[in-house]
Amino acid sequence: MKKTIEYIAFDADDTLWENELYFQEFEKEFCNLLSPYQMSSSISEDLFKVEMKNLHMYGYGLKSMMLSMIETICKVTEGEGNIGLVNKIIELGQELLQRPVTLLNGVKEVLSAFQGKYKLVLATKGDLFDQQRKIANSGLQEYFTHIEIMSDKKKADYKKLLGKLECSPEKFLMIGNSIKSDIIPVLELGGYAAHVPHHVTWAYEQYEGKVEYRNFIQLNHIEDITNYL
């Protein structure tokens, strides 16, 4: 693999910097706001169902979550919740949209080690404005020859990215924390993929199956990829 790879792509959220932890904290505050109406576990279930229903319209990201929270408020309160609940969700969401970016351990060291040896790509999905903000605030732009903010991360999306890069799958390595979004689609195309587990994972991104591809690499920490390249 070391002699084959030309492009190394990195996922952003929960691979390069912290993200899902903040989303889960936001959801916990949301459940607390609605606790007079319903149990927290039930509220979380309702929110997830609404998010899944809306995914094809809103896509991924914090703004999508906020809209689904407002819809869930209407559902849980049967339309009788006061406007203060909605205002609080907007306030908390806007605070999160402006939160500083916290890089994960080992990220800069890995990017520095590979810069100049490989063509580095940042391949993320989510809300365009929010992802652009986080990328700019991360201070990592200088490491990447190409940055792609994708609406989704399915096989067709990676095929389109490879076309832009003029890169064949066997010369491409994707590194990310989501088996579902970062790993399986790339392996299905014939590329290489390295999974870096994160301590929290959104329910939608959780994957229970076993990954059985010869081009799959399981890492404990992002720095471990240097043992393969």
Image: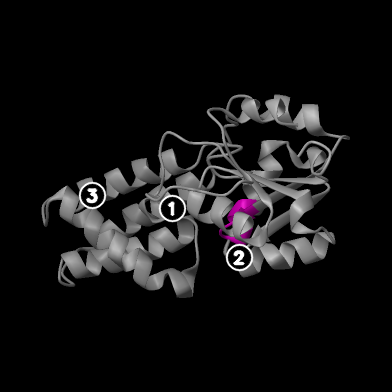
Closer-to-camera residue (213/7): 213
The x, y position of residue 156, in whole percent, is 63, 69
Q: Which amino acid, by three-letter code, is at mark 3?
A: Cys
Judging from the image, the colouring scheme is: one colour
Secondary structure found at label 1: helix
Q: Which amino acid, by three-letter code, is at mark 2?
A: Lys
Say whether disc 1 or disc 2 marks the residue closer to the N-terminus: 2
Q: Identify the image quadrant of residue 226.
A: top right
Say which of marks 1 and 2 sits in front. Answer: 2
Numbered range of the magenta stretch: 124-131
Say which of marks 2 and 3 sits in front. Answer: 2
Q: Identify the image quadrant of residue 106.
A: top right
Closer-to-camera residue (64/212): 212
Lateral position of residue 1 relative to residue 21, left or right: right
Q: Pointer 1: what residue?
A: 205
Q: Pointer 3: what residue?
A: 31
Q: Pointer 2: what residue?
A: 155
Closer-to-camera residue (169/7): 169
The x, y position of residue 142, in whole percent, is 81, 39
Report, in whole angstroms, how far the alpha carbon at label 1 lies from the one at label 3: 21 Å
Against 30, residue 137 (above or below) is above
Secondary structure found at label 2: helix
Q: Which amino acid, by three-letter code, is at mark 1?
A: Glu
Q: Are marks 1 and 2 in contact (CB under 8 Å)?
A: no
